[in-house]
Image (spheres, grey):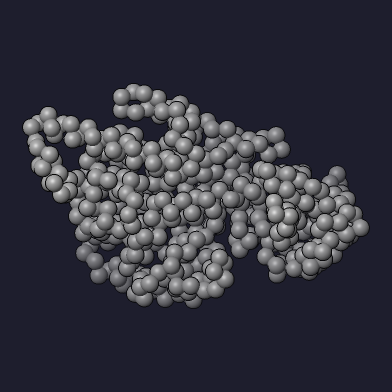
Amino acid sequence: MPLVRVLPVLQPLLLAFAAVFSKPQQRHFDHYIQGLIVQDHRRTLTGMSRHVLDGPGASSWDRFVTTALWELPALNDRWRVLLRRELRRLKPEGKRIAGKQTDFLIFDDTHHLRTGKALEGVGYHWVHAAGRTQWSHSLVLAAYRTGDYPFAYRCKAYLREADVARLNAQREPENLLREPGRRRPLGTFRSKGDPVGAQLEAFQPLRPNRAGFVLLDRGYLNRRIVRAARQKQLDWCSCLKSNRVVELLTLSLETGEVRANTRLAVQELRQQLAPAAQLGEPGVPYPWATSTPAWQALEAEGRNFPALAYRARLEGIGVVQWVWVQERYRSGRWSPVVPLEINRLDLTAGEVVAVYLERWGIEVLIRDAKQNLGLTDCQIERLEGTVRHWVLRLLSQAMLTLLRLQADQGQLRTPSGQAVASVGRTLGEVRQFVKHCALVELLRWASEQAAAGRSVEERAATLGLPA
């Protein structure tokens, strides 16, 4: 799809970043974001640059992504300002948990398979979906979900612990080899656990007086994360690793008195619960520590779950509610029993399950970014360029989600002034709407060229098309 100008539907969002870039960089930014959204082919720098009318070559875009003097922190800060402004203006309704509208800050990691051996920051990482280590880049992604709208919020690459010190030691000498005018602060390489804590400590609430939850994968729950969530007045919910040790409690909520306790590993209790999951009270291990006398049958988002809740203490974290859930599939089979930890003791088991199901939004976000925006398409030698590539693609996802929110609230209009009732429910449908807008601009450009007396052959040659 040839891109002949900045699309009016995207222009207000793109202009919000004008303070981050110089004028030439802003043009590169506009075309790059539009190319990610509109093009259907593999989104390499060379492939996208061919479809921009009078646009830059692939080498110019390569310099824009890898070496141009613009800073990721400034871009990230500007995006958060824009997102905060739009959410407060449009006021989407949040999911109700315990009677309060609630938003969610979700963390997860994803892996991008690589082939080059000289790529900075690449290594063998464990990929759960494959069940083995794979040669890949890895990043930690934060998503902000309000209602039915998940927005990419921040991302950060992480490395194997064994590689961090070596790569950090190489950074400073390489920076000193640059010309003084082109030197700039370079980010420090980090291992897997550091980015989540740093992002959570820097988090600023996007909506006033709105309850919030931090949702974590099993590898991220630690003392630093819990402390940062508490400082930000956020609740948290996570799954637990099998090797964690938990202390079951008989706890009086009125007085806080602990009357009995038993220490055991997560895997130990799972082995006892698995055969008893479909039983009533006789099949419940340690019934004195449960906050519900038997397995409860729950329904959340059209899915069926039996659940059992315990009061427990997790070392270094404190007293938590420990909810074990299992899903019954439509085929009649059962999923494995899953342990959920949450800091809120007042929530019912059904509310805990509803909270943790919101974590699925980041899985959909990552899938859509890979399938619709080419998140894994580009390989760049320097890790800084790779991270910029990721940020620009995730920013495209966030812009498309913001367009969907604007349309649902009746705030999106075409260049002719007509209100857009809906742009679809999925990222692919919103992207298709933007492609239609690009087609309209192409038709408008062709009409303008015809009115100026240019022949079909001349217009085709301008677009690089055979005629």
In this image, 447 relative to 295: left or right? left
Position in image of residue 114 (x %, y %): 40, 69
Q: Residue at x 27, y 46 (%)?
A: 1
Q: Residue at x 40, y 47 (%)?
A: 395
Up the image or down, 220 lies above or below 159; here it is above
- The spot of residue 197 in percent (x, y) is 55, 57
Q: Is residue 260 above or below residue 90?
A: below
Q: Nearer the viewer, residue 18 or 32?
A: 32
317 or 457, nearer to the observer: 457
Q: Residue at x 48, y 31 (%)?
A: 408
Direction right: furthest residue: 282
In the rendered image, residue 317, in percent from the top left (x then y), is placed at 70, 58
Rendered image quadrant of residue 429? top left
- Which residue is at the far top? 417
User: Does the rendering let one see residue 137?
Assistant: yes
Q: Judge whether 87 appears above or below 46 on screen.
A: above
Q: How many numbered circles are shown?
A: 0
Give whichever of 228, 17 is nearer the camera. Answer: 17
* Residue 347, position as x, y percentages in the image: 75, 44
Residue 71 can be seen, yes or no = no
- Examine the rendered structure and indicate whether residue 84 appears above or below residue 44: above
Q: Residue at x 54, y 57 (%)?
A: 108
Q: Residue furthest left?
A: 453
Q: Nearer the viewer, residue 72 or 382?
A: 382
